[in-house]
Image (cartoon, grey):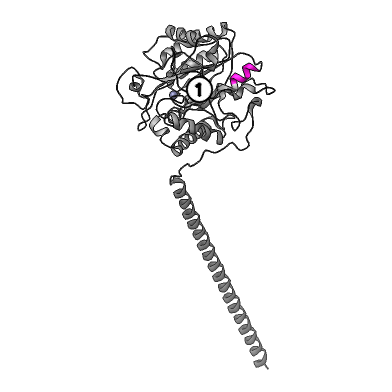
Amino acid sequence: MSELPKSLAARQAERRRRQRRRQKRNRAIFLLVCFIAIIVLIIVAISSCIHRLSSKSDNDTVEVSPTPITSIEPTAEPQALNGIPLPSEENDLLKIIEAADENGGVKTCYLTFDDGPSSEVTASILDTLRRYNVKATFFEVGSIIKSNPDMARRVFEEGHLIANHSQSHNYDNLYASESSFINEVQKAEDAITTVCGEAPKMKLFRFPGGSYNAGDHASEKQTYKKTLADAGYYYIDWNSLTGDAEGRTKNAEELLGYLQSNIDTDYSAVVLMHDASTKKATAEALASVIEYLMSEGYTFKRLDEIDYHPSSTSSSSSSSSTEITDEEEYLTDDDEDYMSEDEEYSDEEEDYDSSSSNTSSGGAILATQAPGSTTRTSVDGKSVTQRSTQ
Ligand SMILES: [Zn+2]
């Protein structure tokens, strides 16, 4: 009788053993599955990291490769500032200023400084402008902005307009072809946009050497005026100057005297000056220049603040003659140049009286100013001639 319960107990013990074995096996299978799942997850994570890294380096390669600029980006939506004509209608800003005068605008002075920014001279000019609460326009060179971005930023932050004066200021590079011209304008515009943190509201260019139809690269410049218009750019020369880049070096007093001799104070004035590192006399003269212009009844504005009365635009279609004649008195342009290779300012290039032909600015264009009331027509109608010594 004791056999039976014994065998029952043995069977039960055997069942429990099997059950334990089964549980053990299941646990082992579960752990194995978990282990495999973890391995798979690790493999997926590693491969996705590798993929991301390799695609990033592909992108980097694309960014590094040079992308030639073949066109100037037009303004997204052309908009007339202060009601002035669009560049497609008229992109010579001096003509627009003359039209504003004739339409009853307030006589205005637009101080312009080319070829900067430079550390000391630009800083001194900014100090003086601030003292008199005068806003001005700085036609800066892209490569110079790149080497002195802090000063360019200061110009912008103190409320002045930074406009485009090409990337290199090297005439032979800039005017070599339409594509090199476009490339330089776009690069300089990019430099301005980067340093200001925003694109200028007005796209404005000043031709290094002026836009006159005379001298070296004259015919190319006439073509590029249209190139600029198509890209939404205005351009502007000047109708008065202190002569700080003309002939022999002048002291501050002489610069003021030179301006007084060529400005027509009956009308708005676009005054050419320079803030390159060698133009200390310009900085020294500025206070007396501003006081003189104030005494003549001028108010001062940036070139994107033209007081325009759109009701009458007749004079904007005035003569665009590009004939060259000669006259008795000369105004010079900013015929300085830069060394394109090291992008450093070259003092030698200012030696206009030298007979050396080592500069691309040798063909400095001299615009004449007719005496008296004919001054204002000097840019279009006025005579231009070429310096005899190159
Ligand atoms: Zn210049």
User: Residue 314's spot in the image, x, y percent?
Assistant: 64, 22
Q: How many marks?
A: 1
Q: Quadrant of the N terminus?
A: bottom right
**Residue sitting at x 67%, y 92%:** 4
From the viewer's perspective, is 127 left or right of 7?
left
From the viewer's perspective, is 163 left or right of 349?
right
Q: Nearer the viewer, residue 361 or 6?
A: 361
User: Residue 45's spot in the image, x, y percent?
Assistant: 52, 59
Q: Nearer the viewer, residue 322 or 230?
A: 322
Q: Given the current orientation, which residue lies at the most extreme right position?
A: 311
Can residue 305 be seen in this snapshot?
A: no
User: Residue 72's spot in the image, x, y percent?
Assistant: 52, 38
Q: Given the current orientation, which residue lies at the most extreme bottom position?
A: 1
Can residue 263 be seen in this snapshot?
A: yes
The residue tagged 1 is 237
Relative height, residue 17 to residue 198 (above, below): below
> Hey, what amino acid is under mark 1?
Asp
Instruction: Tell whether position 273 is magenta.
Output: no
Q: Quadrant of ligand 1?
A: top left
Q: Nearer the viewer, residue 108 or 34?
A: 108
SS at badge 1: loop
Which image quadrant for residue 31? bottom right
Q: Quadrant of the C terminus?
A: top left
Q: Bounds of the magenta span? A: 97-103
Relative height, residue 138 to residue 168 (above, below): above
Which image quadrant for residue 117? top left
Q: Nearer the viewer, residue 43 or 125?
A: 125
Relative height, residue 356 to residue 21 (above, below): above
Q: Main secondary structure of the magenta part?
A: helix
From the viewer's perspective, is 173 left or right of 102?
left
User: Residue 187's spot in the image, x, y percent?
Assistant: 47, 35
